Image (cartoon, coloured by chain):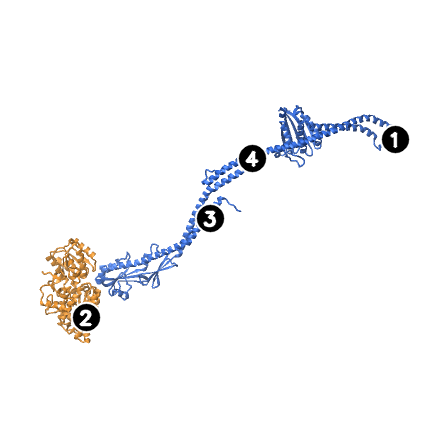
Chain colours: A blue, B orange
Amino acid sequence: MTRISLSIALPIFVAISTLLVVILITITLSIRIVPVINASQKTHVEVRVNAIASDIQRFINNHLQLLLEHSRQPLLVQSIMQPDAYKGRIKDFMPDLTFLGEKYSLNLIDFQGETIHSTQDNPAFNYSTLSWVRVLLDRGKNYHLEISYFNNRYYLRLAQVMIYNQIPEGLLVVEIPLTTMIEQVSEKGRLDALSMKLLWMGKEILHAGKQLSGETIEHSSRVPGLSLNFVSDSQQADDELNQLILEITLSILFLSSLIAIVITGVGKKWFVNPVEQLKKASIALADEQLYEVDTETQHLVELKDLGEAFNRMAERIYNREKSLQKRRDELMKLNEELRLSQAQLVHSEKMASLGTLAAGVAHEINNPVGYIKNNLSALQEYLLVIIPLIKEYYRFATVHAEQGQSEQLDKITKILGGEDLDFILQDIGPLLTDSRDGTERVKEIVAGLKSFARIDDAEIKEFDLNQCVKETLRVVSNELKYNSEVTTELNEIPQMYGNPGQVNQVIMNMLVNASHAIGDKGEIHIKTWREYENIKLSIADSGCGIEEKNLKNLFNPFYTTKEVGKGTGLGLSISHGIIDDHNGDIQVESELNVGTTFTISLPVTRPKAELN
Amino acid sequence: MFQQLIQQQKYVLSILALILLNTLPYSKLQAENIRLYIDADRTGVRASGISIEQGVLTALSEVNYTLGGKKIELVIRDHHGSSRRSKKHLQEYLQDKHALAIFSGLHSPPLLAHREFINRNRILLLDPWAAAGPITRYPSKENWIFRLSIDDSKAGYVITKHALEIDGFSKPYLLLEETGWGKSNLNTMTKALKESGVKSMGTKWFHWSLGKNAASIILRDIKASGADVIFMVANAPEGKTFARAMASLPEQERLPIRSHWGITGGDFAEVIDAEIRANLDLAFIQTRFSFLQEEQNEFSLTVLNNAIRLFPNKIKGAADIKAPAGFIHAYDLTRLLIAAINATELTDDMEYNRNRIRQSLETLSQPIQGLIKLYRLPFSVYSDLNPDAHEALSEKDFTMARYGKSGEILLISN
């Protein structure tokens, strides 16, 4: 299962929520709002189109109204009635007649449709031929609107009947270029995204705005045959709408991201940091350290309470742990002591049994060895008689043989079986001496064994350390003689108090260890001396040495570097315990492949056990 | 109004047709008819046109609509005051082989505009009203326009003298329509004032169909100039506008108006009724005859009775003759025409006839009784030395007049 950090999960949660909101808004915009906007867009286009169409209508109406007002100008009326008399004045007057500031081609037409005056140099029309002129002059209508094409342009022609005394007396006709009309209604970007076509009799005569294709709205106009076609650019509207939706979406996305960042920041501060602190505190607690969660900076009440509760719990657990550890240490120490005592007990017991056995064996051996020695002494004395006797017998036989009596000698020679009788007789004496020395030695060994075991000798007494060294050397010399050359430097030292048996055990242990360290061939140097109130004993070997890392464990029980079966790991531990009991200590100096020196220091004074 | 006009025309023609059908076979009707045209304004100053027609018909009725053995047919045309329309009618006259003479209407501008055309084309034109001085003064021996009406070259004098000498005004202001008629009056009035040693306070021109507000502004300007009287040359439509404008000004800003007679040509007295007129000091020039004068002779009564008989629906008494100047002048002028025709013989060549009648008019040796006066040699051959040769009336035939309570014209006797 993949797990993620709260500090990552929180922003992801916020980001996903934001994304969902954005998607929801975008969908809402697309499904609900876009149709509304489209509808309103359509309405807007219609309003604009209507506005333009009504502006065109207004333009026509205004110009028609202005034409009517101009047609009432007394000077124009008078000119209609007396054109010849007014020729000059009308020529000056008419060009100044404006329509909302614009000047157009103006024509003054008489009651027969003939042009009285035109502001154009060459009037384009003979109005008398037009049917509508007749209709107007015959009071059929007051005005006329039409589209006219001349001089390569389309014009809006407005004609107003001129009345004098309620009778149509002529017409005032204005010709307005359609382009002017379109320019006036389409200024100020009113045709943005719109296309306007002027159709006359179904034929396109003018176009304004961009060339677009889209929905067409048709408007009729006041001018017969003239209609307006509007095309709205739905594409641009759609593009703008899409752009708008995109902008809204991006804005929300941006804002949401901002909010996400803020929430992430706040979340990190409010949620993640407290949890991290709790985590840190838990790890510290597991590592048996006390790390206090900072509850003062917590923003959330629950997390503050949790932090405080955790702190309380951590403190208690820590304290409990500490006391447990203390107890465990005590128990372990007790246990260790127990094991050591047990081992010592076992060892002591073993040694005691061995001592008793050795004492028993020594006692049993002592008697035969005693009479063997005595018998040998008697045998030596006997031989002092027998050997000269035999010699004499042999000389006698020989003499007899020489004398011809060889029978004796032959018998003797036969008994001898070729052995050299002189050598045998000569060798018997030393053989007996050696045997007597041997028994003597057996006697010494047994005495040493008895003394070493000291079964009955467990209490503290005065002893001589040099004597201990000698005794021990006697016991282990067999062990040492194959690979070690032992030298001693036993200086004069005072008698001291203690358990010489235990001290012997220590010295023997040291010597055995030294022998093991030496391997094939080496030296062991034993030295005793007095140094102030302490007696010192050093045993130096030229063995393999001890690695430094092993030095600190040297005196731990059961610690051994020897092969399985060769050592118990208890020797030095017990030695340390014995020396400790004697208020002394053991120092070790060792150099790898050079040798090791154990130095035992024991006080001259009586040990405290004795003092008690 | 338009329909009324058509009905009127139909009415007159049906009378004539009835008469002609009763006297002549149809085939001869076309060949021997004489057509007299009346080309007047029967729209803007409708009353003038109608009264002219009534005057002509009343005079013709006295000869049973027959002259020189030929039936007289009246052709009524309405030029609305438009020179163009008038020109069209003149051309129609020229195309008509039966057309003998044409009566003009109240407006001077058409005649001024076409004076050259009329004389060049030998159109026999009889002017019972239009008053502009140059109309009859075509610089040629062969002058085709005869007038029996007020002549502006004299009207200006009459108006000026009356205002200065009788009314006692001293600071006149000229208010003139901007037409040839207005300009001809500027000349005579300026001259008349100069002769009286008075200088006008100024001159204002106006166009036809001006509005009441424009008229008010003009009147205020005139008042501001310090003038004490306005000499106005206007026809009924603009005359009404100025009268209304004047009446609606505060009393202290109003000025007396001495007008040319153009205002009497239409429905002035009906629109500017007695109530409005009470706020105005308005007098205008007229010829020295009125059916409403107390002294009526037998001749004038006969004419009035004839008229009442001829137009029973329209004329029931003297006051019913609207724009009486038109009636009186047209009647007298028709009497002169009849005399001229009777003094010669008509041929089938109407162009020839026209010239003969023109010459006959210039040489009417017999005195002819008219409403205004007994005419003795009313016309003569025109020359620079004889500028009034084609004027039947003279200064002494003119006087000033006012409207009575019911809109009748009352001459001011002096």
Q: Distance between the residues labelled 4 and 3?
A: 49 Å
Which chain does tag 2 point to? Answer: B
**Mark 1 belongs to which amino acid?**
Leu
Q: Which residue is drawn at 80% across and 29% down?
A: A428
The reply to whether dot 2 and dot 3 touch (C-beta < 8 Å) is no
Residue labelled with disc 1:
A409
State the image quarter where residue A199 is shown.
bottom left
State the image quarter where residue B7 is shown.
bottom left
**Mark 4 belongs to which amino acid?**
Gln
Q: Which mark is residue A16?
A: 3
N-term mark: 1 or 3: 3
**Mark 2 belongs to which amino acid?**
Leu
Q: Report the label total.
A: 4
Q: Do labels 1 and 3 share a chain?
A: yes
Q: Which mark is residue A325?
A: 4
Which chain does tag 4 point to? Answer: A
Q: Distance between the residues labelled 1 and 4?
A: 97 Å
Residue A597 lies, with reference to residue A124, above or below; the image says above
Residue labelled with disc 2:
B13
Residue B331 lies, with reference to residue A541, above or below; the image says below
Q: How far apart are marks 4 and 2 (CA)?
A: 153 Å
Horizontally, residue A578 falls left or right of residue B359, namely: right
Q: Looking at the image, which is closer to me, A560 or A460?
A: A460
SS at circle 3: helix
Q: Are marks 1 and 4 on the same chain?
A: yes
